[in-house]
């Protein structure tokens, strides 16, 4: 359950409609405003922002990425505001905020692995079972949480949308200037291990840590680099950055990549 100390922040996040007037249909517009009347064949209801997939409070690893592109069939991406008896995000009650937070925390626990969005399956193959000290990472036990860099889904892939002026405005509103949702979550929850999958450039270096290990390239599609955050003289956070790659294409190297990540992660336990 969301802590009372975090309730104000998550209320602001789940009620956010800062991008309501950015009318580009390729972006977040229809997820905030919906589309058409309920009687229309083109009807799309407004949806709840996606803060995270998985247990953001107790997980051992965060993966910072972007939403599965516009897929309303996913139970979080397509979660309609009407489920909570309201017509827009701004009308959500505090009790709704608490329910939404828990629904997002329970994503992997509540669904069998075969029903997760296919986006997560490559990460399951990469991370599930990796040893962290004496513990083996387990998705369904809540050990891995995917935290969205941009809290509203986009109709097209974020990497394409952000190149537009409208995409940059969404980026500013959500992360860089106005709300800074993800940086606030990093400060609030203080994850020890963070993997950035194609999102490292969205976060300031002082939150990722000073680069102390050169990039390791496994193929033309994937490189990893490791940063350590130790502002108080002790190791507080390790950040591993992935270049954006299709992990499903890297199966021949999968064990080598797992070994590389596991070695770095065990520097902090």
Image (tube, rainbow, N blue to C red):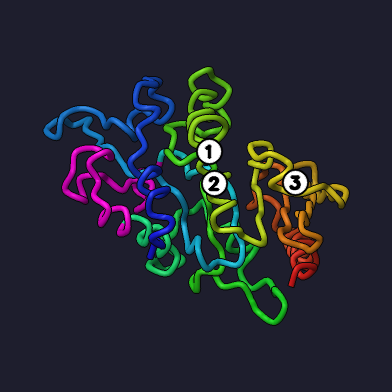
Residue 111 lies, with reference to residue 100, above or below; the image says below
Say which of marks 1 and 3 sits in front. 1
| Front residue of this view, candidates 116 and 150 | 150
Calculate the distance from the C-alpha at mark 3 to the C-alpha at mark 2. 28 Å
- Residue found at x 80% / y 68%: 267
Q: How many marks?
A: 3
Q: Earlier in the sequence, mark 1 or mark 3?
A: 1
Q: Would you say the residues marked 1 and 3 are in contact, meaning their CB atoms lie under 8 Å apart? A: no
- Residue found at x 46% / y 39%: 69
Q: Which residue is mark 2?
A: 184
Secondary structure category for the residue under label 1:
loop
Q: Residues within 10 Å of mark 3 (few under 14, many from 20)?
A: some
| Front residue of this view, candidates 241 and 160 | 241
Picture coordinates of residue 221, whole percent (x, y): 74, 42
Quadrant, the C terminus: bottom right
Q: In the rendered structure, find residue 180 and report the number of the disc placed on it.
A: 1
Picture coordinates of residue 66, whole percent (x, y): 53, 43
48 within the magenta span:
no
83 within the magenta span:
yes
Q: Which residue is mark 3?
A: 222
- The stretch of residues the image draws in magenta is 71-99
Q: Would you say the residues marked 2 and 1 are in contact, meaning their CB atoms lie under 8 Å apart? A: yes
- Residue found at x 47% / y 45%: 68
Left or right: residue 249 versus residue 17 is: right
Q: Residue furthest top?
A: 165
Secondary structure category for the residue under label 2:
helix
């Amino acid at each position: 359950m969301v802590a009372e100390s975090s309730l104000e922040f998550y209320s602001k996040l789940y009620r956010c409609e800062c991008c309501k007037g950015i009318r580009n249909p390729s972006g977040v517009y229809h997820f905030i405003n919906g589309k058409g009347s309920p009687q229309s064949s083109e009807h799309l209801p407004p949806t709840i922002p996606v803060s995270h997939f998985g247990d953001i409070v107790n997980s051992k690893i965060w993966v910072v990425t972007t939403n599965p592109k516009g897929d309303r069939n996913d139970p979080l991406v397509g979660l309609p505001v009407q489920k909570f008896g309201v017509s827009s995000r701004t009308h959500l009650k505090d009790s709704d905020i608490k329910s939404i937070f828990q629904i997002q925390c329970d994503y992997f626990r509540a669904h069998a692995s075969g029903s997760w969005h296919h986006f997560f399956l490559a990460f399951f193959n990469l991370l599930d079972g990796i040893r962290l000290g004496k513990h083996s990472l387990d998705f369904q036990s809540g050990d891995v949480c995917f935290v969205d860099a941009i809290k509203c889904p986009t109709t097209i892939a974020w990497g394409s949308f952000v190149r537009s002026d409208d995409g940059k405005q969404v980026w500013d509103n959500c992360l860089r200037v106005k709300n800074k949702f993800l940086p606030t979550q990093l400060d609030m929850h203080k994850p020890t291990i963070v993997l950035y999958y194609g999102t490292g450039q969205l976060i300031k270096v002082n939150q990722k840590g000073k680069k102390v290990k050169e990039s390791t390239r496994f193929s033309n599609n994937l490189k990893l680099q490791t940063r350590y955050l130790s502002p108080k003289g002790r190791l507080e956070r390790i950040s591993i950055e992935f270049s954006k790659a299709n992990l499903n294409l890297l199966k021949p190297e999968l064990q080598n990549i797992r070994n590389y990540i596991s070695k770095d992660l065990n520097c902090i336990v």
